[in-house]
Image (cartoon, rainbow, N blue to C red):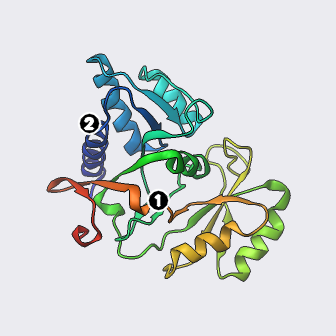
């Protein structure tokens, strides 16, 4: 798939997610290019009279939302929200996800947990039979050395993510490090999610395994947008 085709599929999926938002809703706004297309569509709908409040999951998402004129709020004001719209790095047939390429997965997980419905927007290249991408892990800098050792002992290959156009590691909006952990094909995502979260010093990891029952996947495909509500329709 070339870049232009992938961009088109992302835009279609993002627009389809935004069209599911109704006036008066509180909407979680994920981080990443596909969600930014959803924000683009929300901007147009706000211009047509839609009223919503958004909860951004990163500084980047907050800046984009303000640019698009989306009024913002917080989980303090709205601990239960209507919908969260987010992207994913991989989606498996049971709607378990790997997220965190944008280093915002901890806040994204908080917002997904607060949402009554979790809408995941992807292009078809993100649909996989088994999760196998590196798992981003947010780590307290104080504990990074023992955390790296613990991840290695449970079978992972951890690498501290380095910044682009800057020297040194990536720092999250929460002031922590990102460690990308390769485990190969992940046979039991729920167990690995629990194992990672049990390591002191790990804030959270990019495996999303607890929201499958409220997840709707909107995939931009070469045959148009598909609303995936059942694993048996994933190609």
Residue 68 lies in quadrant: top left
Residue at image coords 55%, 40%: 57
Vertical side of 43 occupied by 81: above or below: below
Residue 4 lies, in percent from the top left, at: 27, 47
Q: Tag 1's secondary structure? A: loop
Q: Inspect this view and state whether residue 150 appears.
A: yes
* Farthest residue, direction left: 223
Left or right: 216 in relation to 146? left
Left or right: 227 in relation to 176? left
Left or right: 33 in relation to 194? left
Residue 52 lies, in percent from the top left, at: 40, 26
Residue 143 lies, in percent from the top left, at: 83, 61
Left or right: 122 in relation to 206? left
Q: Residues within 10 Å of mark 1 (few under 14, many from 20)?
A: some
Q: Residues within 10 Å of mark 2 (few under 14, many from 20)?
A: few
Give the labeled residue for mark 2. 19
Total numbered labels placed on residues in the image: 2
* Farthest residue, direction right: 142
Q: Real-space Cα distance between discs 1 and 2?
A: 22 Å
Vertical side of 220 occupied by 173: above or below: above
Q: Earlier in the sequence, mark 1 or mark 2?
A: 2
Q: Inspect this view and state whether residue 182 appears.
A: no
Marking on residue 166? none
Q: Tag 2's secondary structure? A: loop
Vertical side of 95 occupied by 22: above or below: above
Residue at image coords 39%, 31%: 25
Residue at image coords 55%, 35%: 60
Residue mark closest to the camera, 1 vs 2: 1
Q: Quadrant of the C terminus?
A: bottom left
Give the labeled residue for mark 1. 211
Q: Quadrant of the N terminus?
A: bottom left
């Amino acid at each position: 798939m070339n870049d232009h085709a992938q961009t088109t599929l992302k835009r279609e999926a993002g627009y389809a997610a935004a069209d599911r938002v109704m006036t008066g809703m509180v909407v979680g706004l994920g981080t990443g290019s596909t969600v930014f297309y959803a924000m683009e569509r929300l901007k147009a709908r706000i211009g047509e009279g839609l009223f919503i409040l958004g909860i951004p999951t990163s500084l980047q998402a907050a800046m984009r939302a303000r640019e698009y004129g989306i009024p913002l709020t917080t989980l303090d004001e709205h601990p239960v929200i209507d919908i969260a719209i987010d992207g994913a790095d991989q989606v498996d047939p049971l709607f378990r996800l790997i997220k965190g390429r944008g280093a915002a997965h901890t806040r994204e997980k908080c917002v997904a947990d607060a949402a009554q419905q979790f809408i995941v927007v992807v292009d078809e290249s993100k649909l996989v039979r088994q999760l196998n991408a590196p798992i981003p892990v947010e780590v307290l800098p104080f504990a990074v050395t023992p955390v790296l050792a613990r991840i290695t002992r449970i079978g992972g290959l951890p690498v501290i993510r380095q910044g682009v156009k800057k020297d040194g590691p990536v720092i999250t909006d929460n002031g922590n490090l990102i460690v990308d952990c390769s485990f190969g094909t992940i046979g039991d995502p729920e167990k690995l999610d629990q194992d990672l979260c049990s390591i002191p010093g790990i804030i959270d990891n990019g495996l999303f395994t607890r929201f499958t029952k409220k997840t709707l996947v909107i995939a931009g495909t070469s045959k148009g947008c598909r609303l995936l509500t059942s694993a048996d329709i994933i190609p």
